[in-house]
Amino acid sequence: MLDIFHGASGASVADACKGKLIYEGEKKVKSAVIDSRKVSDGDLFVAIAGERTDGHLYLTSAAEKGAAAVLTERIPEDLSPFENNGCSVILCENTSLSLACLSAEHKKECDVLTVGVTGSVGKTTTRQFIAVVLCAKFPTHKTEGNFNNALGLPLTLLGIREEHKAAVIEMGMSARGEISFLTKLTRPDIGVITVIGSSHIEHLGSREGIRDAKLEIRDGMTDDGILVLNGDEPLLSGIENAVYVSLHNKECPYRAENIRNDGDGMIFDAITPDGVITDCRIPTLGEHTVLDAMYAVTVGKLAGLTDSEIKLGLSSFVGVGMRQNIVKHNGITFINDYYNASPESIKASLSVTKGLTKDIGGRTVAVIGNVMELGDRTEELHRSVGKYVSDIGVDLLFTFGNDAAYIADEAIKNGFDSESVFVFTDITDEKPILATVKEKLIENDCVLIKASHGIDMGRIAKILLEN
């Protein structure tokens, strides 16, 4: 039987991942890695042939670093380094799929309340909120970083330990079938879909297509699993046996009311079937983050937490990476929110920026780059952001990239002052936009920096914050 908790033999790992044991060493497998640089004692090193390098080149190195086993699609010509280091060698047809099989077998051994989270917008923030709420009662494991795909999610599952009583697993996707695959590995007891946006519409054709891909989370849920959905999204209405969460729909059993901003975060009352949890406080800004928090309230209630445990968890929230990272530098407030973007998340971030501007008393400045994977709706959806820029009253607009230029054009068409718009189309050279932004900014400005991750807006934020 596979027993990652206490160390699994090479033979049991080979059996679980549907591989063939070529050599069995004496070391026991306790975890798995796909990066040879991170190999340590007790690891299974999974050799992945990637775009930049091939993990098979580092099999011997992994054994010498203390790997307990290696998973490979090719038998090494020389087995002596593995024999000398007590490292098992396991052969399979596809290391990625074998890693997935291994993680699924390990998950079967784990007695944990499992929450799966997906959505076009807000899934990482929601995952964090759910995790901190569950942590108020249970030792909780969660997805870290961007380990939410076909390679990262199995590694996340293999990180579940015997002491964990809950796990919050984020699931990302860009095409049909991906969520189905991930949820069958995860087997969630609770599935959460945050928002149906426009991300990956290039591959899925429509928001309805995106919804259907997200609803694949049901494919792997436990027989008595509970689906938690956005009650403000018409495309998700009427799903049988779903639990709905809302900011605006009064018919939803879980909803937020009396939402206000205290300058350092949001405060709201959480309406639940058991009553009202008053004055919930979260250290994030923007009404959209209240919805993320309400998913955590809902999961907390479904998991049997008390109101005080839920409030404690919400107040303990810590953001992730480059998401809504608010920094003050030389009298200017920067909202560095450039981990990823969709038209919907840009609009939400612009609303947050506008709210901060009112508190500070300065100008609202938007530095926005291309949004990727929008397909034949690229122009339309960028233009929708441009109209929003004009509607909410941004003071200065900088765009970075050919597609982002549509934002500038549409803003001007809707009455935005053309002299307050600065367009830069060459994303290979950040120097022109940097020079102009630095020249135009003044004290008390509130600056949003946002784009798809592939545009690398971090290089702009980094230099602005160094000077």
Image (cartoon, rainbow, N blue to C red):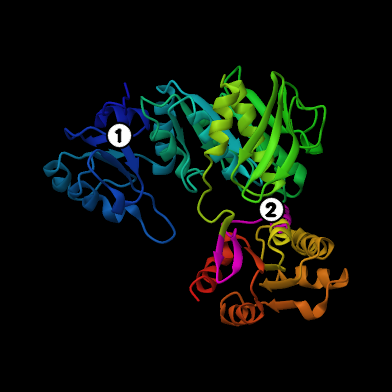
Name the residue at the left extreme: 84
Q: Residue at x 59, y 54 (%)?
A: 324
In the image: residue 43, left or right of residue 112: left
**Quarter of the image that includes the N terminus:** top left
**Residues at badges 1 and 2 in contact (C-beta under 8 Å)?**
no
Say if residue 218 shows up in the picture: no
Q: Which quadrant would residue 46 be assigned to in this image?
A: top left
Mark 2: few, some, or many residues within 10 Å (few <14, many ≥20)? many
Say if residue 57 shows up in the picture: yes
Give the residue type at disc 1: Lys
Helix, strand or loop for disc 1 = strand
Question: Mark 1 against mark 2, which lies toward the viewer?
Answer: 2
Residue bearing the label numbered 2: 345
Residue bearing the label numbered 1: 20
Span shown in magenta: 327-352
Q: Residue at x 58, y 66 (%)?
A: 455
Give the residue type at disc 2: Ser
In the image: residue 320, left or right of residue 425: left
Q: Which quadrant would residue 342 be assigned to in this image?
A: bottom right
Helix, strand or loop for disc 2 = helix
Q: Residue at x 68, y 29 (%)?
A: 278
Q: Is residue 426 above or below residue 411?
A: below
Residue 337 inside the magenta-drawn segment = yes
Looking at the image, which is closer to me, 233 or 135? 135
Residue 144 inside the magenta-drawn segment = no
